[in-house]
Amino acid sequence: MKLAQLATGLALAACSTPLWAADTIIDIAGHPVPVTASGLYDRYRSNPPLAVIAAEAPGIDLSWFKTLPKARAGGMGFASYSPNFYYKNSRITAVFTADLARLRELMPEAVRNVVQPLQVWPGRGLVALTAYAYEYCDNDSYNEFALSIITSKPGASNLGPLTLAGQSMSKQFWGYVLKLPVNTELARVRGVVGYNLPKWLTSIERSETAQAVTYRIGGELTIEAKKLPGLSSEVELVTNSFTNLDRQGRLTTGYAISRQLRHANSSAADAVKLGLGDGNLSAYIKSLKLGRLLRYEYVPEFQAALYAPTLLP
């Protein structure tokens, strides 16, 4: 391992705010990555026995994960298993209208040839802003912020509102990920190398009061969302799929299945407050010309399985 690489890995780790301190270095595809010594990833590299999870976190319901077989994943650039399990998590999602021409401009032509932004009314598409707290997962714990364009499914007609209604009814959504900052180097390297995702390392701080949950990303962007009353405990399975390009410029697709355990939603304009600062990420979001909040989802408890990407047929 080169000293320069090691120094870079340690410097990046210092910028993150994981729940546990990183205190050992491992190699992932030639990248020196700081991880929690004797944490799940250090010990099991994405394949911990469920018996270990049950012993270390006895309050977590593992029944769903017992139905999902893991397999060695090929083509990720490093040894791994699919799906990656996320045992205890929370998220908030805000779906806004955005400038359709700008969304099309931001998608590579090769991707745009197979999926398109959904047009909800003339000149307006949709973006989803989602903040995640992964409290306990195969990659230890980390926070993440996703900015995605809501798109059609590859090979399917783009009928705008009708397509959106169909995705909503089936709970199978498609998107193109624009930005995906995370707050641990482990999550960054795995996401960039293994999933072809636009991840970078920055601070992502989560706080909450009795009324709201707030995420602060990179010291420049805040998203504050209400804790909605009347949470449903009816279990919902939601699939979120994405289309992108791998390092060879080939079209790939991946997906995650979420098992939502407690959840609620709202379309009230005051449900979410977005604070944009002067940084690059805020400027990027400003360029989308966000409009009306169409839907806010408050999901204080969910589980998830993230599958390794495959080449698009």
Image: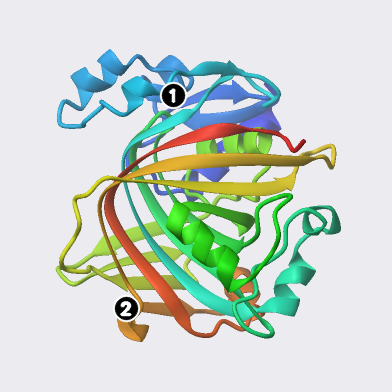
Task: Out of 257 and 11, give the one closest to the viewer.
Answer: 257
Quadrant including the C terminus: top right
Residue drawn at 79 percent across, 59 percent down = 112
> What's the residue type where badge 2 is placed?
Ala
Q: Indicate left or right for 101 with 192 as reference.
A: right
Q: Does the image show residue 253?
A: yes
Q: Indicate left or right for 60 with 290 as reference.
A: left
Task: Out of 48 and 245, give the one closest to the viewer.
Answer: 245
Numbered tag placed on residue 41 in the rendering: 1
Residue 38: image x %, image y %? 36, 19
Q: Is residue 65 above or below residue 200?
A: above
**Real-space CA distance between mark 2 and mark 1, rounded to the nearest whole angstrom:** 36 Å
Residue drawn at 54 percent across, 32 percent down = 307
Task: Out of 108 and 261, give the one closest to the viewer.
Answer: 261
Q: Secondary structure at mark 1?
A: helix
Q: Residues within 10 Å of mark 2 (few under 14, many from 20)?
A: many
Q: Is residue 112 above or below residue 23?
A: below
Q: Secondary structure at mark 2?
A: helix
Residue drawn at 61 percent across, 56 percent down = 175
Q: Is residue 225 above or below residue 66?
A: below
Which of the 4 quarters of the picture holds residue 287? bottom right
Q: Residues within 10 Å of mark 1 (few under 14, many from 20)?
A: many
Residue 130: image x %, image y %? 45, 60
Residue 107: image x %, image y %? 76, 62
Numbered tag placed on residue 238 in the rendering: none
Of marks 2 and 1, the one in the foreground = 2
> What's the residue type where badge 1 is placed?
Tyr
Tell which circle, 2 or 1, labels the residue nearer the N-terminal end: 1
Residue 53: image x %, image y %? 27, 22
- Residue placed under numbered mark 2 in the picture: 271
Tag count? 2
